[in-house]
Image (spheres, helix red, strand yellow):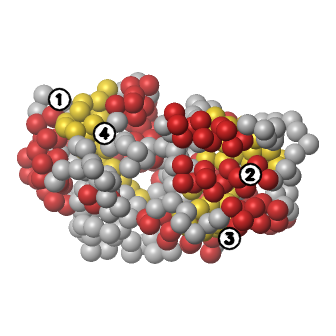
Amino acid sequence: MRSVGFRVDVAKHIGTGHLQRCLTLARELKKMSISSIFFVREYDKELLDLITISGFIHHVIGSATFENIPEDHSYWLGVSQEQDAQDFISAISEQHIDMVVLDHYSINSVWENIVKNAISLPVVVIDDLENRKHTCDLLIDQNYWPNLSSRYDGLVSSNCLRLLGPKYALLRDEFVSLRETKTQKYSSRFETILVNFGGVGNLKVWKVFLPALVKCHKFNFHIITGKLSSEDLAYCKNIVKQSKHIYLEEQTNQMSYLMKVSDFALGACGSTVWERFCLGLNAALIDIADNQKDLVSYLHEKNLVDYLGNLNTITVESISSYLNRLSISSSKYRARKHSITHLVDGIGANRVAKELILIYEKGTDK
């Protein structure tokens, strides 16, 4: 296998998590002398720079605009699956790829059947919703669910290999390195809480959290807002400008290090859950999208995270009350740290990359 084509999008309404886990897998494949090409629909040129910065090339297969972003992620493409599939097929006609890796909530077996019939290549799907049928050779769901063994029954064929659970969490190399490294915590008489809710900022989140953090002086807070408009970023900075216990920045390339040196985290239930787990960073989470609620509820039920509620129901008062009660150094969180580090060892990307190669070799042997 020489090259893999990734079909994934990044946008304000999609977030950066899908792209980031694909970039992680691409880096792992690169170690095995396999190149990667990203095929994307253009929504936000600036966010596409994440691919270039990571050292990979991308091809824009089309664009889409929305008057109003639909809440239903099955419509997030902005075009039909049939149109997107044809655009993809046209784009790869001038490229050599040996396999397609797909990570997109708006795409299902409709798209996959069109592409497989046209190009006869192995198709790999990265998913975590369990809500639609797929025509694929391999499916990856890195999340922790109560029904792992039966998950996706009836949604994929019996011949589809399933890689399910945090054993296959797609984490960057630095998480494994930092996991084994003794790193000094922030030098402060106060414990430090890392606060981030994703690579794309959400002002609605910050309107609730920032006033609560300003009022809480028992901790230091290191805030990564995610990408915001200049007006929204100025709004956030203005709220915390008099608070010496709060450090705020929009973006960072040191997230893994910040997770390692922080004492606790406030965040959302996205891919960063497994990054925190790998480094033993306890956290309190909210769900900011419907597809996150089931997972965060189960993680809370298994005593792996604290759950603060849904974005639409949390308040400044509820966050303040939680922080006032929080005791980071308690035995509860020491025991939890052991549990979460045991669940995620950080080498899932290597396991997945090896399985991709086996799937390809199996196909060529036929």
Q: Position of residue 33 (x, y in %)?
A: 36, 28
Q: Residue at x 17, y 29 (%)?
A: 95
Q: 159 or 179: nearer the eye? A: 179
Instruction: Tell me the SS state at disc 4.
Output: loop
Residue named by callout 3: 303
| Residues at discs 2 and 1 in contact (Cβ within 8 Å) | no
Q: Nearer the viewer, mark 1 or mark 4?
A: 4
Q: Image quadrant of residue 23? A: top left
| Residues at discs 3 and 1 in contact (Cβ within 8 Å) | no
Instruction: Tell me the SS state at disc 2.
Output: helix
Identify whether 215 is placed above or below 331. Answer: above
Residue type beneath disc 1 = Gln
Residue named by callout 1: 95
Of pointers 2 and 4, the one earlier in the residue sequence: 4
Residue 285 visible somewhere in the drawing: yes
Label annotation for residue 43: 4
Q: For the residues marked 3 and 1, what is the alpha-carbon distance in whole angstroms? A: 47 Å
| Residues at discs 1 and 4 in contact (Cβ within 8 Å) | no
Q: For the residues marked 4 and 3, what is the alpha-carbon distance in whole angstroms? A: 38 Å
Residue named by callout 2: 213
Q: Nearer the viewer, mark 3 or mark 2?
A: 2
Of pointers 3 and 1, the one earlier in the residue sequence: 1
Q: Position of residue 252 (x, y in %)?
A: 59, 32
Q: For the residues marked 3 and 2, what is the alpha-carbon distance in whole angstroms? A: 24 Å
Q: Residue at x 76, y 41 (%)?
A: 246
Q: For the residues marked 2 and 4, what is the alpha-carbon distance in whole angstroms? A: 33 Å
Q: Residue at x 66, y 54 (%)?
A: 209
Of pointers 4 and 3, the one earlier in the residue sequence: 4
